[in-house]
Image (cartoon, grey):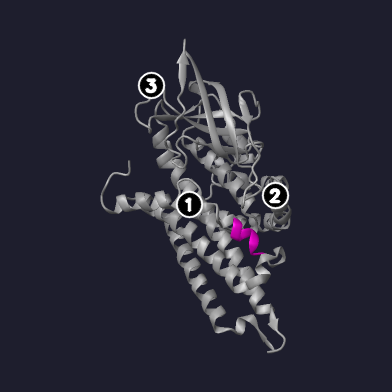
């Protein structure tokens, strides 16, 4: 994809996304208008092949776009991330019974999401406790999924389930579930979270009949798709969301301390050396992790033996960086940062989601440590 084309499309949508962000957050409202604007510019097909109507963006362009959207609105970025994560795994293993799904996801005619996490396995999203059943040749996917982004809005849901007769937690399969039918698809709660308040991340109960035409890849091949496709695309996109949120908070803090003055001293808050030092340290942390994100995204396009380690470390590192940078933004802006007009409170709250979002930072650091020590991840 041409870089100028990408920037032009982003420039066309970001003002609207930014303008809607406060109301989306305040009312915990799904960012419908923002998603509609992104649909109109073709950005919902960002990473899909031009053969199905997509834009064919590289992983590096994907990361840059995700960070830009997150800087404008974290909730919109989360919806966008899950849509593209679903689209990318469907592109890697298209279900034979849904020949038009990639074109519909690329055009935005359908919105996609993932349904992996379950209460029983919590943040270990790769290990569903639900099991596929088969009676007289009829397969049923019955599962209680948690934290499903766009739960009330998704048309295409990629759901995981343990294989029939699964022995190991990693014996699983992925299926396309039609979210539009809502038959056997029940949203069981409303999301009211600390941050990312408009992403409609809610639990759903699934009880649907599925067949070979709904399955992504081969029987019992779900774990490989989770590790080889979903994890890198989701982890890098999630890291990019953290970068965008940190950038938004830091920029707001710099603007505030530069403009706010001590009238009795005839100086600005930025005249305080400690404030400048905090800002410089936060910027250095952000810049270092932006570079790590870009490097990992490039490695996704040409994977090598170190790509998996880079993916694990990038999500964990960028998530933790966003916690630190948004905390610093709040610190240097002082009491004013507690009011919504400064623009720090929303990215501060939104950034708290990344490090507890599966796979969590603690789990990722443990996996990365295994990889560094030459141990098997599972």
Work out whether 152 lies above or below 280. above
Tell me the element at label 2.
helix
Q: Nearer the viewer, residue 324 or 258?
A: 324
Is residue 301 rendered magenta in the image? no
Q: CA distance from mark 3 to mark 1?
A: 33 Å
User: Most extreme residue toward the top, as rendered?
Assistant: 136
The answer to whether marks 2 and 3 mark residues whose Cβ atoms lie closer than 8 Å is: no
Quickly name the residue at label 1.
236
Q: Main secondary structure of the magenta part?
A: helix
Q: Earlier in the sequence, mark 3 or mark 1?
A: 3
Pair 2/3: label in front: 3
Q: Which residue is at 35% across, 49% downward?
A: 367
Work out whether 291 lies above or below 298. below
Q: Residues within 10 Å of mark 2 (few under 14, many from 20)?
A: many
**Residue 84, percent across and down?**
55, 43
Residue 202 visible, this orientation: yes
Q: Is residue 356 left or right of residue 365?
A: right
The span picked out in magenta is 343-349
Q: Which residue is at 69% across, 67% downward?
A: 342
Pair 3/1: label in front: 3
Q: Earlier in the sequence, mark 2 or mark 3?
A: 2
Tell me the element at label 1.
helix
Q: Nearer the viewer, residue 133 or 224?
A: 133
Quickly name the residue at label 2.
34
Quickly name the residue at label 3.
165
The quarter of the picture where residue 291 lies is: bottom left
Tell me the element at label 3.
loop
């Amino acid at each position: 994809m041409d870089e100028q084309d990408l920037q032009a499309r982003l420039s066309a949508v970001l003002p609207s996304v930014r303008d809607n962000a406060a109301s989306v957050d305040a009312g915990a409202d799904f960012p419908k208008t923002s998603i509609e604007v992104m649909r109109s510019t073709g950005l919902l097909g960002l990473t899909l092949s031009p053969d199905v109507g997509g834009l064919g963006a590289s992983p590096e362009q994907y990361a840059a776009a995700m960070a830009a959207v997150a800087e404008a609105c974290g909730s919109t970025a989360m919806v966008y991330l899950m849509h593209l994560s679903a689209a990318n795994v469907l592109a890697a293993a298209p279900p034979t019974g849904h020949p038009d799904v990639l074109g519909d996801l690329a055009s935005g005619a359908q919105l996609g999401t993932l349904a992996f996490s379950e209460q029983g396995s919590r943040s270990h999203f790769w290990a569903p406790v639900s099991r596929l059943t088969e009676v007289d040749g009829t397969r049923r996917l019955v599962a209680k999924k948690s934290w499903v982004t766009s739960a009330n809005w998704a048309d295409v849901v990629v759901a995981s389930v343990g294989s029939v007769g699964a022995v190991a937690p990693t014996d699983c399969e992925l299926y396309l579930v039609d979210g539009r039918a809502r038959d056997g698809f029940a949203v069981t709660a409303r999301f009211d979270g600390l941050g990312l308040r408009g992403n409609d991340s809610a639990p759903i109960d699934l009880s649907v009949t599925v067949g070979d035409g709904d399955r992504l890849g081969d029987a019992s091949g779900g774990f490989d798709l989770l590790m080889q496709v979903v994890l890198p695309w989701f982890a890098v996109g999630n890291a990019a969301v953290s970068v965008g949120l940190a950038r938004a908070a830091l920029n707001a803090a710099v603007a505030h301390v530069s403009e706010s003055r001590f009238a009795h001293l005839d100086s600005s808050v930025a005249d305080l050396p400690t404030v400048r030092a905090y800002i410089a340290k936060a910027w250095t942390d952000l810049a270092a992790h932006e570079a790590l994100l870009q490097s990992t995204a490039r490695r996704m396009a040409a994977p090598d033996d170190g790509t998996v380690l880079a993916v694990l470390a990038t999500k964990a590192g960028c998530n933790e960086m966003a916690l630190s940078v948004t905390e610093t933004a709040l610190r240097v802006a002082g009491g004013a940062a507690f009011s919504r007009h400064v623009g720090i409170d929303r990215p501060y709250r939104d950034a708290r989601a990344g490090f507890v979002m599966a796979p969590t930072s603690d789990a990722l650091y443990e996996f990365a440590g295994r990889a560094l020590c030459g141990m098997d991840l599972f």
